[in-house]
Image (cartoon, rainbow, N blue to C red):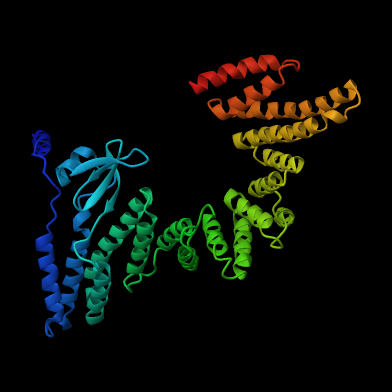
Amino acid sequence: MKKIILMVAAALVLVVPTVTAQKINEEATLAKLSKSDADVANAKKAVKSATWLNRAKVYTDALMEPTKALSTSLDATFLRYTMGEPEETTADAQNRQIWVYPWVKVYMENNRVIAWQQEREIKEGLFDVIVEAAAKALELDPKVEPKVKPVLDIAINYYSQLGEVSTAIPDYEVAIDSFVKAAKLQESKIYSQVDPKYYFFAGQMAAFLGADNKQYFIDGEKYLDKARELGYVDETGNLYYYLFHCYYGQRADDKENLVKAKNILLEGIEKFPKNERILDGLMSLYTAEEGIGDPAELVTMIDKFLAETPDNPDLWFGRGRVFYKLKNYDECIASFKKIDELKPNDYDTNFYIGYFYVEKGENENRLFNEKLDSFTSTEEYMAERKKVRAIYLQSIPFLEKAHELKPDNVDCAQILKEVCFMLRDEEGIMDKYNKYNEIYKKLKN
């Protein structure tokens, strides 16, 4: 019986008439804020911790009011139920629906909320008042800490979520501001430490915006350094890459920033030798800035690490990537073959070895074509041609092994059929072409 009652109740919820427009309790909320303003202006009330605690609460409620009904993954039916019909609907460049309400724009994808953009607040300066009120309440009576913390938790969650949805839109300026505010709220003595992820996210967004406004590079450096100081654990090492961009973006103001950019990348590659962004950053820095460094330094450094830990596949990966950038395909392939010894039957390793043989073949084929006019006999021409084709042939066993490990990977099947088509005159290769061409067509469809 209880189950039936609950089902009926759920059905009743669904048939409640849709609200016609977003309802914000603006007048009542402003009245509470005005009363709080009057209370702190009152000499007798201003010395009471409860006055400031209440002020933190009502200002936090005002902060939440315009978006309190929203959450990511909320479906369209419940969005209409909680917020009413939008004033209009439109779409963005990614073809995401935008439901426009008086206070907020809601971004929809697959009929669910994925983000929102708040157009205005109940009152300006809410954040500063919340920080001040919480601090004052604790100053007047430290015993109210258990009551202050839930209020700050709500505000922190609000800014953290606003940062996340603003990143998704993307509106990086709002995201940065929101993540920094979440961090600053945790600077209250209630919390043992600020969560460093907020400063990392803010720094990451600032690095993106620095190309258009140099101040963001300056801010990004500050936020990322703060994240490091607080012990941010970056599983991929991208913090070093973003910090590099912040230093590099300030090189015109101080050449020392070039040295800082180089050093942060070197520190990053030592800890994260597999991070392709860091490797690419170092290669770009060494080739674009005269006197800053030689790409060969990277090989020397990685070989030094390998002397201490020769069984580290990530280091061999980094070494192979550097040699690939230097177009030294033999050393690149040798590095990846070492990974194959350490991690047999790995798809990526076999795929890359095959791919690098193809790249080496492409390079040798280009050189071959450049000296066509220099051949003095057909025999010489055919001998050189055979050498080039032999390089391509070496790719096939590794690509076939990769295909066995991941038979549904369309990229591997495509390269296989293209290489086999090019070498179709070689013994047994036409059959391979027919095989992988059929596989590729099936996977593509």
Q: How many marks?
A: 0
Q: Quadrant of residue 18?
A: top left
Q: Quadrant of residue 260?
A: bottom right
Residue 153 drawn above or below residue 398: below
Residue drawn at (78%, 27%), measured in percent from left and top?
A: 390
Residue 207 drawn above or below residue 363: below
Q: Is 80 or 370 nearer to us in this picture?
A: 370
Residue drawn at (34%, 65%), measured in percent from left and top?
A: 181
Residue drawn at (21%, 64%), measured in percent from left and top?
A: 60
Residue drawn at (62%, 56%), measured in percent from left and top?
A: 269
Percent across and percent down for residue 111 are 27, 36
Residue 321 drawn above or below residue 252: above
Q: Judge left or right: residue 294 versus residue 272.
A: right
Percent across and percent down for residue 106 are 26, 46
Q: Name the quarter where the N terminus is drawn.
A: top left
Q: Judge left or right: residue 342 versus residue 384.
A: left
Q: Judge left or right: residue 97 versus residue 278.
A: left
State whether residue 422 appears in this view: yes
Q: Quadrant of residue 294?
A: bottom right
Percent across and percent down for residue 400 are 65, 25
State whether residue 406 appears in this view: no
Percent across and percent down for residue 308 are 71, 56
